[in-house]
């Protein structure tokens, strides 16, 4: 039986005999061959489906590390600012570990499904009248001046846990892919993958490194524009961040790997979001689709050679944000009389479309 | 790399060389030790977390079988009536297989997260002015009189795929548990698990069989009451079914295994739902919690001996139904000014509760 991410990759992680054991069976997520999209885009395309994680996003990889290290250090409580996925993950692992969890969220900017998680897991949720960046400033100050442990992505153990996704991609392919495409919000994940690939090469598990291609949403494209975005806006709530905490390391990953950081529009994101579900059967949250949207953009612009192997990181589960799903697909269900003939007739018309 | 459920258990499944290959990496879900609840209830308690499946519920196990067999038979379209989980699963696998999917739902009785899935996966959703049982009658008639394949649980391949969950439980424990506790709605799943345990014993993989304990919601307890419920009502939407399709086989499973079928109230379900999240870090949909609610009830009534090994089947992901989550936990997030002092003060008060 699987013993979880930390046991699986402990030689690469900052754990010791004193580190408590904890897992909700994070990681070990499928790498799904994108059959139809590979054909359409003339690529060897794979999807790293991080929505399979216990709380539905890649955050669980880093959070399990952050929580065990907080417990190891004797902390009784953890705190984070979050637009959603981080809070859900922190609350779940804190519950499992028996720690108190305080979540500070920007009021009015969190998708329903995400907030419900933190609340159900028993986190104490505080909502502040500000944006994500302001909430983050507050929890940083609190962690600096109290015994509460900060578990936002600036917590260094988060990156350590998250880098295991790169190990898995290599284990699943038998090598590193040619390109790794990844959504960029707070920029911790691209930083973590790049560290993971480099660690794995140093250890002799892979020979080559992928080119790292990060994609911000156009309305929150601080790195691409070269300046902090004061009022970030995008349908991809999980990457609606105007001042990425790991800005520099993200740029470094792109530069060192001969990759790039680019942006994609909300329209491109929703188009890719529908593609994933309808062509591959994978329902990912909108932010996840930024990676595929970016790959499609690079192909259109001739920046991605035919036939190369590309892994798109899908960061979270589509169930995280059901309202976007309903808005993204124009057809609402038709209400019919409860009769066989009415249904048959509607089916025939549907088939002729 | 994992090749999916059908490849993993093909010797137990009705597949041949002509059966097309299909997987979205269903199955292989974690069996999570319920540490705190084991202690509280004085049991050796495990949670089979089926919310880890690709569309977030156990239905994926049976659906992958139903869809490959439909494709093998040359069908171009599948149809189902569904309160949610079945439609999501059918739509995902049909999309991956390239088949048309028609979903008939009872108007106004489907949780938002569930409907969004079928729609995003590209299913054609038709809503009829009736309840689940009436919708099921209509799709059965349509499948009988056309070339469209019915993929509701009356499709025999569904049960075959679903029984693999029993195999996994045995593989994970190294034997069958003493008791298996499972929610009962349409009753296909308890039927499938029982078949799985028996098949596995016949094949010599296990020696003993578990006692099967199925739990209906009190407002939809047709089997317990011995009569069809015309207007089923429960917060556990996934088991809000008044006339279980697999009624007889469910009763048979309980009888043959020296188990039982009982009911639990909505209050007991929501209490167990909070327990799972806050004590074990597992966010399951309300219907899933019927299994734990039932175990707690049996312990209270002295019907479950101390120390026995029990597996609770958690049928779906909590993200399927975010609105129930928000309703189930009374505390709404407090809105504070965006200042460190305000947050610190609120934290101190929270800690004193």
Image: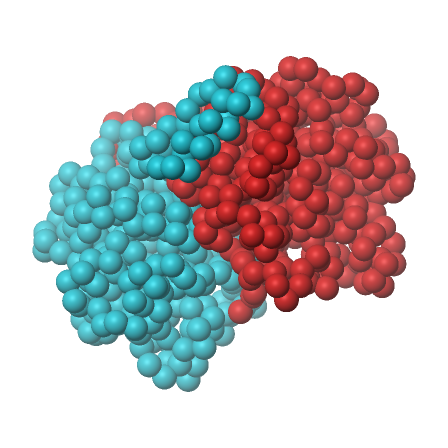
Chain colours: A cyan, B red
Q: Is residue A123 left or right of residue B305?
A: left
Identify the residue shown where x is 45% and y is 77%: A174
* Foreground of the two, B165 or B302: B165
> In the figure, A262 relative to A327: above or below?
below
Where residue A53 appears, x then y in whole percent?
48, 52
The answer to whether residue B65 is seen in the rendering is: yes
Where residue B286 appears, x then y in whole percent?
59, 31
Identify the residue shown where x is 34% and y is 59%: A37
Q: Is residue B193 left or right of residue B99?
A: right
Q: Is residue A33 left or right of residue B256?
A: left
Where residue B57 appears, x then y in whole percent?
57, 43
Identify the residue shown where x is 29% and y is 70%: A179
The image quarter in which residue A274 lies: top left
The image quarter in which residue A17 lies: bottom right
> In the figure, B272 relative to B20: above or below?
above
Residue, far left: A226
Q: Is residue A130 left or right of residue A143?
A: left
Where residue A187 appears, x then y in whole percent?
26, 56
The answer to whether residue A104 is seen in the rendering is: no
* Foreground of the two, B128 or A314: B128
The image quarter in which residue B9 lies: bottom right
Identify the residue shown where x is 29% and y is 29%: A108
Q: How many marks?
A: 0
* Foreground of the two, B175 or B335: B175
* Foreground of the two, B151 or A65: B151
């Amino acid at each position: 039986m699987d013993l979880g991410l930390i046991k699986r990759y402990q030689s690469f992680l900052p754990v010791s005999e004193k580190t408590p054991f904890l897992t909700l069976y994070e990681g070990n997520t499928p790498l799904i061959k994108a059959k139809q999209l590979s054909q359409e885009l003339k690529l060897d395309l794979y999807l790293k489906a991080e929505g399979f994680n216990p709380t539905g996003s890649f955050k669980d990889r880093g959070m399990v590390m952050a929580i065990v290290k907080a417990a190891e250090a004797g902390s009784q409580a953890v705190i984070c600012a979050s637009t959603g996925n981080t809070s859900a993950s922190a609350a779940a692992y804190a519950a499992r570990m028996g720690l108190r969890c305080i979540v500070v969220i920007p009021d009015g900017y969190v998708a329903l499904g995400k907030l419900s998680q933190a609340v159900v897991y028993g986190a104490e949720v505080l909502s502040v009248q500000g944006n994500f960046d302001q909430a983050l400033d507050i929890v940083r100050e609190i962690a600096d001046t109290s015994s509460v442990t900060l578990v936002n992505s600036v917590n260094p153990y988060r990156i350590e846990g998250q880098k295991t996704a790169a190990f898995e991609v290599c284990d699943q392919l038998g090598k590193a892919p040619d390109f790794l495409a990844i959504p960029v919000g707070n920029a911790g994940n691209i930083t973590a993958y790049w560290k993971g690939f480099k660690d794995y090469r140093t250890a002799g598990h892979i020979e080559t490194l992928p080119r790292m291609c990060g994609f911000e949403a156009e309305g929150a494209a601080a790195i691409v524009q070269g300046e902090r975005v004061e009022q970030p806006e995008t349908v991809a709530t999980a990457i609606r961040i105007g001042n990425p905490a790991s800005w520099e390391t993200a740029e470094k990953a792109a530069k060192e790997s001969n990759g790039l950081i680019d942006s994609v529009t909300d329209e491109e994101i929703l188009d890719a979001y529908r593609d994933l579900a309808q062509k591959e059967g994978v329902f990912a949250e909108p932010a996840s689709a930024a990676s595929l949207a970016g790959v499609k953009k690079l192909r259109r612009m001739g920046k991605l050679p035919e036939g190369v192997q590309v892994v798109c990181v899908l960061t979270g589960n589509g169930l995280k944000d059901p309202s976007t799903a309903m808005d993204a697909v124009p057809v609402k269900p038709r209400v019919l009389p409860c009769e066989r003939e009415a249904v048959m007739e509607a089916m025939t018309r549907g088939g002729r479309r």
